[in-house]
Image (cartoon, rainbow, N blue to C red):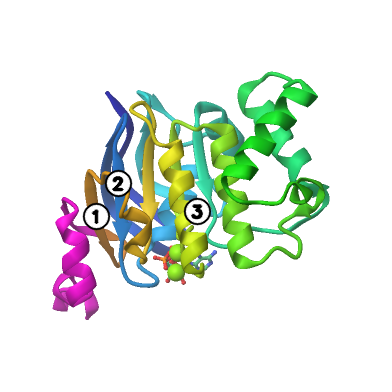
Amino acid sequence: GNLLDINNLQVRVEDKVILKDLNLTIKEGEVHVIMGPNGAGKSTLGYTIMGHPGYGVDKGNLIFEGEDITDYKTDARAKKGIFLSFQNPEELSGVTLENFTRTSKNTVTGEQARFMTFRKELYGVMEALDMDKDYANRYLNVGFSGGEKKKSEILQMLMLQPKLAILDETDSGLDVDAVRLVSKGVEAFKNDSNSLLIITHNTKILEYLSVDYVHILVEGKIVKSGDRSLIKKINENGYKDFITSDLSA
Ligand code: ADP
Ligand code: MG
Ligand code: MG
């Protein structure tokens, strides 16, 4: 069935309308990719689905598993199985990566994970991501390199096992090896019953994933949807074919 239905969504940041009449349906098991020029509203879409308070829904709604979540707070959405990996992960001094991840997981599942069971699982995922175990005791993202921050986002995703994971440029600013590890993490995450919304410029991360739909977002609107062949077109010609004169006027 449909996991997420976005209907006629209009979103404002402060007093500026960013997303305009946006419609998108993500079914269980699907991988959707959003591409678009800088400033198109891609991160805004991610924040809006996650329920960031700075992003006001003026019109339309968000339906998750048949339930209208438009007015739900972020933590309620996380409990329903929505996860957002930030484009710029924040540093959280005073909270270790392990404690942060355990608290998140306990909050999302509503259960207290056993300390050692949790740690074993965490170390397993860290190993798969080629992260040193010492990072578990470091403050979240503090002093982490760009690549390490992105890996720590993928780690959260693998530990939380959301139904819908939104990855906002998780692959940008990473070297080839880090991109490969992130894509491996994403592949390991993906199964028939979860869905991905991947915002990206870098199509390396998509190489090993089966992509169901690609959407081009320009000036707050989805101007084109298609299959993965759209990625090649964008890589070759950029977005100019999708920016109509009256949009850029
Ligand atoms: P993208 O991720 O596609 O590059 P964003 O969603 O980050 O685009 O931004 C879309 C537009 O919204 C841009 O014009 C940006 O300046 C504006 N915008 C986004 N977030 C904010 C914010 N917190 N405050 C003010 N303007 C914002
Ligand atoms: Mg941007
Ligand atoms: Mg962005």
Three-letter code for the amino acid on which mark 3 is drawn: Leu
Please report whichever mark, 1 or 2, sits nearer to the chain's N-terminal start.
2
Three-letter code for the amino acid on which mark 2 is drawn: His
Three-letter code for the amino acid on which mark 1 is drawn: His
Please report whichever mark, 1 or 3, sits nearer to the chain's N-terminal start.
3
**Circle 2 residues within 10 Å: few <14, some 14–19, many ≥20:** many
Quadrant the N terminus occupies = top left
Q: Which residues are magenta?
A: 222-249
**Circle 3 residues within 10 Å: few <14, some 14–19, many ≥20:** some
Secondary structure category for the residue under label 1: strand
Residue 56 appearing in the image: no
Quadrant hosting ligand 3: bottom left
Contact flag, marks 1 and 2 (Cβ < 8 Å): yes
**Circle 1 residues within 10 Å: few <14, some 14–19, many ≥20:** many
Q: Quadrant of residue 246?
A: bottom left
Camera-side residue: 242 or 233? 233
Disc number at residue 215?
1
Mark-to-mark CA distance, 1 and 2: 8 Å
Q: Quadrant of residue 38?
A: bottom left
Query: At 19% across and 65% down in the image, what residue appears?
Result: 232
Give how far across and how far down residue 71 sits, in percent: 49, 36
Please report whichever mark, 2 or 3, sits nearer to the chain's N-terminal start.
2
Residue annotated with mark 2? 32
Query: At 22% across and 47% down in the image, what residue appears?
Result: 213
Camera-side residue: 137 or 246? 137
Residue 217 appearing in the image: yes
Contact flag, marks 1 and 3 (Cβ < 8 Å): no
Disc number at residue 181?
3
Query: At 30% across and 52% down in the image, what residue appears?
Result: 33
